[in-house]
Structures are given as structure tokens and as C-alpha cells.
Amino acid sequence: MDPITLRNLPPAVASAIRRRAMAKKTSLNKAVISLLEEGLGVRQRAGTAYHDLDDLAGSWVREEAETFEAALREQRTIDSDVWR
């Protein structure tokens, strides 16, 4: 694939790309590709059928994840009186 060079990006656009890369924990290049795919309505990623939950992936803060894990641990506890 041919490389594309972008010059003279407006500061607001460059900042938005950097924020997107940081939020998604990805490279600037991948952030730009993702933004272009979304804006153009195309997806080139093989094997990915659905994208409706993409914005949720990795969006929890540590406290939310710990609360969720604690709730799962509680649900996974075996009640020995029930299983006699």
C-alpha cells in the first residue's frame, strides 16, 4: 500500500488525533486510519463483523472493573447447602 503523508494539519485536528490515540491506547497511525474508516464508512479489518460496541471496549476505569469483578466473584460462590 502506498504511504500517504499529511502536512499542515490544523492544531485542533492534530490534538484530536492524539487524544483518540491515547484514549484507544494505539499509535497515531492506527488512530488516523480508524478515524478515516469511520468518516468514510469503510472497514478494512478482516474478521471483524460488528463494531457497535467498539467505543465501550477499554472504557472502564480501574474502580469500575474492580466493582464488576467483585460482583462476579460473589455470583460464582457455590452455596454448599444448595448443592447437597
Image (spheres, rainbow, N blue to C red):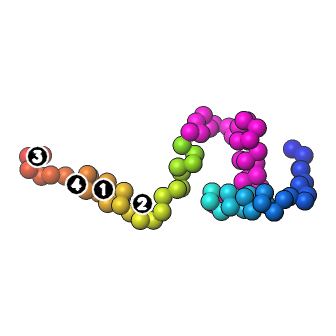
Q: Which residue is mark 4?
A: 77
Q: Which residue is mark 2?
A: 65
64 sits to left or right of 6: left
Work out whether mark 4 precedes mark 3 in sequence or the reverse, and give the earlier one: 4
Work out whether mark 2 precedes mark 3 in sequence or the reverse, and give the earlier one: 2
- Is the C-beta separation of discs 2 and 3 under 8 Å? no
Q: Which residue is mark 1?
A: 71
Q: Residues within 10 Å of mark 4 (few under 14, many from 20)?
A: few
User: What type is the residue that disc 1 sits on?
Assistant: Ala
User: What type is the residue that disc 2 sits on?
Assistant: Ala
Q: Which residue is mark 3?
A: 82
Q: CA distance from mark 1 to mark 4?
A: 10 Å
Q: CA distance from mark 1 to mark 2?
A: 10 Å
Q: Residue at x 57, y 48 (%)?
A: 55
User: What type is the residue that disc 3 sits on?
Assistant: Val
Q: Quadrant of residue 48?
A: top right
Q: Position of residue 53 (x, y in %)?
A: 54, 43
Q: Position of residue 75 (x, y in %)?
A: 26, 51
Q: Nearer the viewer, mark 1 or mark 4?
A: 1
Q: Nearer the viewer, residue 38 or 84?
A: 38
Q: Residue at x 74, y 57 (%)?
A: 17
Work out whether mark 1 precedes mark 4 in sequence or the reverse, and give the earlier one: 1
Question: Which region is colored magenta?
Answer: 25-52
Q: Residue at x 89, y 50 (%)?
A: 4
Work out whether mark 1 precedes mark 2 in sequence or the reverse, and give the earlier one: 2
Work out whether mark 4 precedes mark 2 in sequence or the reverse, and give the earlier one: 2
Q: CA distance from mark 2 to mark 3?
A: 29 Å
Q: Residues within 10 Å of mark 3 (few under 14, many from 20)?
A: few
18 sits to left or right of 79: right
User: What type is the residue that disc 4 sits on?
Assistant: Thr
